[in-house]
Amino acid sequence: MKKLHLLSFIYFGTIFQSIACDVCKRNQPELLQDISHGTGPQADSDYFIIGGAILIVLITLIYSVKYLLKPGERNPEHIKNLILK
């Protein structure tokens, strides 16, 4: 129970820290105003870099879930099968 309280405290604490302050809202472009602190993207190429990073993360997530659920190993002694049991 203590772990649950600690995890919820950490979760909600990080949410409130990630909301941008008034100065950062004013300096951010319209798309990112309530999301982050700092100056934001400086050029249009920054959006392509961010988009590429998001794409890589999504592809990695999809493949990791795919291979976790269906590892494709036929050997019943394989470590993936031992974990999924």
Image: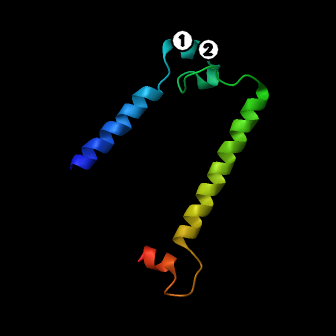
Q: How far from the left and from the top, in percent, is residue 18?
A: 47, 28
Q: What kind of residue is marked 1?
A: Val
Left or right? Give the position of 7 relative to 65.
left
Against 23, residue 50 (above or below) is below
Rendered residue at 48%/79% (across/down) = 81
Q: Are marks 2 and 1 in contact (CB under 8 Å)?
A: yes
Q: Which mark is residue 27?
A: 2
* Mark 2, secondary structure of its residue: helix
Q: How far from the left and from the top, in percent, is residue 36?
A: 55, 26
Rendered residue at 44%/79% (across/down) = 82
Q: Quadrant of the C terminus?
A: bottom left
Q: Which mark is residue 23?
A: 1
Against 37, residue 27 (above or below) is above
Q: What kind of residue is marked 2?
A: Asn
Q: Quadrant of residue 14?
A: top left
Q: Residues within 10 Å of mark 1 (few under 14, many from 20)?
A: few
Left or right? Give the position of 17 relative to 65.
left
